[in-house]
Amino acid sequence: MVSALGNRLAAGLWGWLARAGKVHAGSVTARRFAAFGEGSTMAFPPGTVFGERYISVGAHVLIGANVTISAGFVPGLDLGPDTLVRIGSGVVLGRGSHVVGHRSIDIGDDVYTGPNVYITDQNHGYDDPDVPIGKQWPSEAPVRIGPGCWIGTNAVILPGTVLGRNVVVAAGSVVRGEFPDHCVVGGVPAKMLRRYAAETGWARVDSLQAQSRNASPANG
């Protein structure tokens, strides 16, 4: 009986913390951000969050539990006048995801991610074979994720990635490079698998390449 009562009390306390611990527009925590839009919520418990004044969050954004969002290496750095991490309106970040910014990460409106997605604009350097990789100066490149994209569970978005509008990233993919609007990418490393064209609709990339070869003058 004591154990059951303790479980009910613990569940009740956790429920209260989950409600009270949410970050929402106008709250003390939200005011630390460069912007935190109307109707946006960060669930409890959060992951690691710092560099808030260099992070902007649009309106009606849902940030799941245990999501890390950071700007800079450590809290308290002066990173200049500009926002480094920009999260558009209508975005959903799945629980356990990470958005780790040092130079520039731009997530467009209505981007949805599954759980445990990792997005970063910085990577470890490994040029010097005599120095531990963790002690080498990292490399950076801006990341831009276009509006309407879907990024599947456990995907990794690496520095220099540019995704167009309404791009699907398959679960577990490791993405680097530029990909156009309305395509599906997947794999390690990720490659474009399917693409939409007004003339053909959705088609596999190898099929589109074959059509292009068959239609070329050399094959005519």
Image: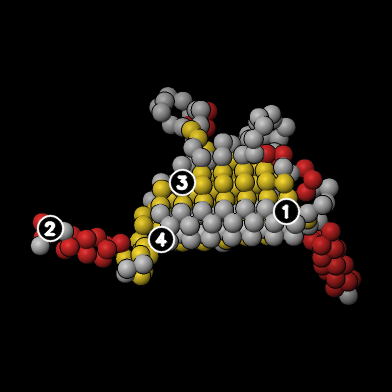
Q: Which residue is mark 1?
A: 37
Q: Are marks 4 and 2 in contact (CB under 8 Å)?
A: no
Cα distance in 3D space between marks 2 and 1: 54 Å
| Residue 57, horizontal then vertical, whole percent | 68, 50
User: Which residue in the structure is indicated by mark 2?
Assistant: 217
Q: Mark 4 is on which residue type?
A: Cys
Q: CA distance from mark 1 to mark 3?
A: 26 Å
- The residue that appears at 83% across and 47% down in the rendered structure is 28
For the question of whether residue 43 can be seen, the reply is no
| Dot placed on the residue nearer the N-terminal end, 1 or 4 | 1
Dot in front, 2 or 1: 2
Q: Is residue 141 visible?
A: yes
Q: Amino acid at mark 2?
A: Pro
Above or below, 138 against 6 in this view is above
Q: In the displayed structure, would residue 75 be above or below residue 86?
A: above
Looking at the rendered structure, the secondary structure element under dot 2 is helix
Label 3: which residue? 161
* Residues packed near mark 3 inside 10 Å, few (<14), some (14 to 19) or many (20 plus): many
Closer to the chain start, of discs 4 and 2, is 4
User: Distance between the Cα atoms at labels 3 and 2?
Assistant: 34 Å
Q: Which residue is mark 4?
A: 183
* Front residue of 56 and 118: 56
Q: Quadrant of residue 191?
A: bottom left
Q: Nearer the viewer, mark 1 or mark 3?
A: 1
**Image location (x, y in percent) of residue 42:** 72, 56
